[in-house]
Amino acid sequence: MTTVLDPSPQPSPQPSPASGRGSKRGRARRTLVAFALIALLLAVLRLWPHAPLSETVGSSRAVYAQSGELLRLTLASDEQYRLWVPLDRISPTLVDAVLLYEDRRFYAHPGVNPAALARSAWRIASGERRQGGSTLTMQLARRVYGIDSRTAMGKIAQIGAALWLEARFGKREILEAYLNTAPYGGNIEGVQAASLIYFRKDAAKLSLPEALTLAVIPQNPVKRIAERGRNAELQSARERLWALWAERDPTAKQHAPDAQLALSAQSRGSLPFLAPHATDMLLAQERGVQEVRTTIDLRMQATLERVMGQYLRTHADVGMTNASALLLDASTMQVRALIGSADWHNDAIAGQVNGTQAKRSPGSTLKPFIYALALDQGLLHPKTMLKDAPTSFGPYTPENFDHRFAGPLSAQEALIRSRNIPAVSVAAKLSKPGLYDFMRLGGVQKLQSESHYGLALVLGGGEVTPEELAGLYATLANGGISQPLRYTQPAPDERPVQPLRLLSEEASFITLDMLRHTPRPDTTLPARPAIAWKTGTSWGFRDAWTAGVFGRHVLVVWVGNFDGTSNPALVGVDAAAPLFLRMVDALRAERLDLGEIATRQPADLRQVEVCTATGGLPDALCPVRTTTWFIAGKSPIQVSNLHRAVWVDETTGKVVCGPQPNARQQVVEQWGSDMRRLFRQAGLPRASLPTDGCEKGEASETAPLITSPLRGVRHTLRVKKPEPLVLRAEAAAGTQTIYWFADDALIGRAAPGEGITWMPDMADSGRRYVLRAVDDQGRAESREVTVDIAP
């Protein structure tokens, strides 16, 4: 069968309308898929974890005073002044001015503005004035990635980097990064560094003229650098920007006079270098913190520096060349001023050493805390009579600074006059806590063991820093509560430190009241308004101190040499006290002392009348009375029995029994032998109590009082050079002899107040002895002592 093919052409099949619609839908789907993939890629790029732009460059560090003044600005690691701040901390006026001048379509383009690039290329090809076509993103890309955009390949790389930045970061992040890295002349980068250097203010506080000035500098930082004073290029660029600004916002014309003001910008060479020891310390402590907000009050800092400089210049002839001072607001525990040395730049005095952090012997500045602890433990009140007389405390025999003894005196007078022996006597009677425990709990660091110091700690045997001493005095100012010092302002979410009570409110109140009676050396009268202050001198005249509380402030002043050189002029009351008082006077003269912290009198505090001679509650015979502070339930309460009424024959002057013709009644003081001896040594002799007539048999029943050895002290004797123990006891009036026994064996006899020596058995280490002092009336006191023998 033969098949015949039809040679005529056959019509091709036509697509149906339905198939055309399917093709279009397919292309649309592919387009949507493509856009979705692009969007997904962009989202992945944006959301993929990456370091913020702020980490691409190093940063300077700024230290600010309490009120925001710049204290110091450091260089970044690449020797640039650059301080990164969030966009929200940059003046909106400056942000708007930069966008208007540099990149008006910043929020509309993807990082590159093709129209601006084409316009720039055309003007260059036509030989016209160059006009930049780079967006802010492109400028940022050039700086971040170090691209040389002066060649064609460099420009292409810059465009690619700009697109990459836009894909990875948001517009606000890019704008923030640009403003923080823009060049502002020399080694100044970023608006915050430029604002601080040129105008000494934060970038958030720029005025309109200042914002316009900073907006135009980055386009030509070499010619428009602001610190050159009057700059025609800078002024011309600012005027062009102002014209654009006024054109965009007609209402801005009212600010034309301000916008056209000529500015006198400051330079890098005049950057502040204030409170150098405080900023040094905080920059070292606050590592990683870009902006340190301190508690330093610049007016107070400047006042103390001025007073210290004047004082040392007038005392240079006696070798006073260096000092330190720390001023603390006790109500907030914030340090208001810190002077580490008299001159940070003076190498001859090791000026860069921060003396407020140096351990030195504090002398007598710790004595107030002895009395505060004794007040709390019910050992005394301000008018309690103490003895300032030669006394041995085991092997320790302290002396007064003047090598003299004042005799009997009240606790308040002993503190004010800084008598050593009464302070050591009081410290020896303290139970836990003693001074050592108080200091340790109060923040004093690096103390040796308590046994290492013994009672010598009272007189400065340990070492403290002025900072630590200020914290202890702030405890008194805050009613016995101890808190750490602050050098930086607290963060909004910072948790407060739990305070620690070391003293009662009553004891703190009384101690400050006693110190307020200290007379000024320049007037011999207490300071008005009141200042509670105490001086101190270290052994060997190496350190002179004064510490005190005035208003709400605590001030500690140290005068000396960092190398510990001795100088007879370094006496607390002569060297440090005048400087301390001048500083207080200057702060008050400039009205920088806000007055006392608002406090109430503690509830358990009472004013009680006592007999002046004894400090006891007055009996009917007490001739002179005074008032003193008593802590209810704590202060010692006893009736004074010092005075006694006797009848004296006016003709013979002898005591007679009862009222008789030609006899008169007379009140006499029946002091014990120890007190009579003290009065005699002090040049204030007291008459002895009569021992004949009707007064016989009326002597006090008081037993002898053993004053040496101390109770609870272990005594160590060395085999090679054993030193005998000194035994001493005081007795009531009329006692002539005291007999001493060791475990019922007679040792010897002595008059009241006189000492005898006793050598224990050297072959028996750790033995306990019972020592007894028996007077000639048969009254006795005993004391147990332990003696160790050391090879």
Image: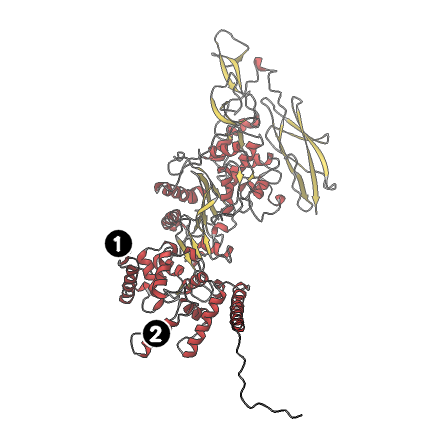
Looking at the image, tell me whether mark 1 or mark 2 is earlier in sequence order.
Answer: 2
User: In the current view of this chain or complex, which residue is farthest to the front?
Assistant: 1
Check the picture and name the quadrant holding the N terminus. bottom right
699 left or right of 357? right
Callout 1 environment at 10 Å: few (<14), some (14 to 19), or many (20+)?
A: few
User: In the current view of this chain or complex, which residue is farthest to the right?
Assistant: 764
Q: Which mark is residue 128?
A: none
User: In the current view of this chain or complex, which residue is farthest to the left?
Assistant: 257
Q: Position of residue 231 (x, y in %)?
A: 28, 65
Q: Is residue 777 visible from the viewing direction of this image? A: yes
SS for callout 2: helix
Q: Quadrant of residue 150?
A: bottom left
Q: Position of residue 667 (x, y in %)?
A: 50, 17
Q: Position of residue 571 (x, y in %)?
A: 45, 44
Q: Is residue 2 above or below residue 409?
A: below
Q: Nearer the viewer, residue 656 or 415?
A: 415
Q: Nearer the viewer, residue 236 or 745?
A: 236
Amino acid of disc 2: Ser
| Applied colour scheme | secondary structure
Q: Quadrant of residue 530?
A: top left
Q: Which mark is residue 120?
A: 2
Residue appearing at x 51%, y 66% in the figure: 39
Q: Which mark is residue 254?
A: 1
Q: Is residue 229 visible from the viewing direction of this image? A: no
Amino acid of disc 1: Gln
Q: Is residue 124 above or below residue 549?
A: below
SS for callout 1: helix
Q: Nearer the viewer, residue 458 or 557?
A: 557
